[in-house]
Image (spheres, rainbow, N blue to C red):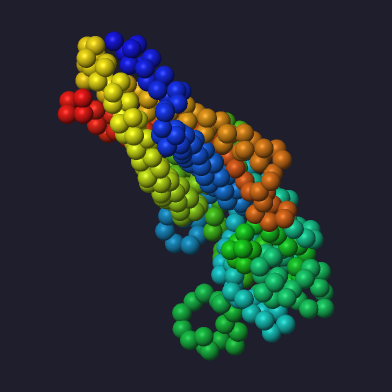
Amino acid sequence: MLNVPFYIAARYLVSKSKQNAINIINGISAFVVVVAAAALFIVLAGFAGLEKFSVTFASVFDPDLKVTPATGKTITVTDSLLKQLSAIEGVAQYTKVIEERVFLNFKQKNHIAYIKGVDENYGNVNAIDSILGYGSWVLSKQSVVIGNGISNTLGMGIFDRNNRLQIIVPKPGEGSITSTSKPFNEAFVIATGIYQVTEELDKKYVFAPISMARELASIPANQVSFIELKLTEGANPEVVRTAIETLFSNKVVVKNREQLNDALYRMLNTENIAIYLIFTLVLIVALFNLAGAITMMILDKKENLKTLYAMGVTLKQLRLIFFLMGALITVIGGLLGLGIAYVLLYVQQVSPFVFISPSLPYPVAPKVTDMVVVMLTITVLGFGASKIAANRVSKALL
């Protein structure tokens, strides 16, 4: 039963009408479907590329897992506890971190940041080589590594031994700030390196040895702010998380990289959904052309339909002809649009022609899931428009 309507629909699709306006409308409707499918896929791939590009910064700065205190500012650790931590299956390396808010002063210029005291194992957990922009990663009692934003704010370079950076941290305790002759701890250091990650992070941290941060923040030797971990390849983060929380008697919270950047991920996911919905609305408007083209075709083929109806073709089959015609335009146009879009995205990946800046090509990440989403969206909307237009075939028309 489907063969006859499908055959006629295919003939109507490729044959030209006697009225040139009908041919133009059909061509425009097919072109709109192709462009809509290509545009939606390119936008989704471009956004996925930007998402991947943004998350890359988090992956080089944040560890696989981060152990934070459930309450308070510090975690109490012992040598025995740390040995048990390193023995957990899936833990490759760990590093102790002390973090505290500090006041920076350099040549009468001030900035509020955080000192991040790290031990000698920090480089084995985080890829410090990939974030260091200038100088070298040398941390001592007299040297630190600062962010590019801090360097620009304070007008501070590296290895400037004549002008030292003053780091000030208020002493913990109660009472008036004037109750002691020196209510703060301070250190005078030089910068041996400048790191670059993002504008926000570049203004936030001063990396120092953990001993300096501990002394400035007045934190006891058996306490740390965080413990950052690198997992072995193939390790299950959830299993490792449970083991760590059990080891610390559930007095800690263990977060993965996505949870550490939950605001970023939420923003990216929200924007992705918003862009998809906006382009879906554009698709709905664009596919009105398809419904209009099918309606014009029905009117153009009115005499043929009367003949077919007189020959015994049912009203349901006549409607099916134009529904299948719209479905063919939708499917063929969607596949063609995806093919064109994929070629353009592949060229952008291997030989970029669109740039964010002269040295930074626009990132794209075409995914099979996005292709499926685009095809499903085009198909559902196109079939819906075809169904609505095909219902114009009625007994009154015949």
Q: Quadrant of residue 151?
A: bottom right
Give x and y (percent) for residue 196: 68, 59
The N terminus, quarter of image = top left
Seen in the picture, residue 337 relative to 61 is either above or below; the reply is: above
Viewer-side residue, 52 vs 281: 281
At 60% from the left and 66% from the top, the residue drawn is 204
At 51% from the left and 42% from the top, the residue drawn is 39
Viewer-side residue, 394 vs 355: 394
Q: Is residue 196 left or right of residue 87?
A: right
Is residue 87 among the parts visible in the rendering? no
Seen in the picture, residue 231 relative to 383 is either above or below; the reply is: below
Q: Is residue 396 left or right of residue 246?
A: left
At 54% from the left and 55% from the top, the residue drawn is 226
Give x and y (percent) for residue 319: 27, 24
At 59% from the left and 70% from the top, the residue drawn is 113
Viewer-side residue, 33 vs 164: 33
Is residue 99 among the parts visible in the rendering? yes
Seen in the picture, residue 1 relative to 181 is either above or below; the reply is: above
Viewer-side residue, 370 vs 258: 370
**Residue most extreme to the left:** 396
Q: How many marks?
A: 0
The C terminus, quarter of image = top left
Give x and y (percent) for residue 154: 69, 76
Give x and y (percent) for residue 199: 61, 63
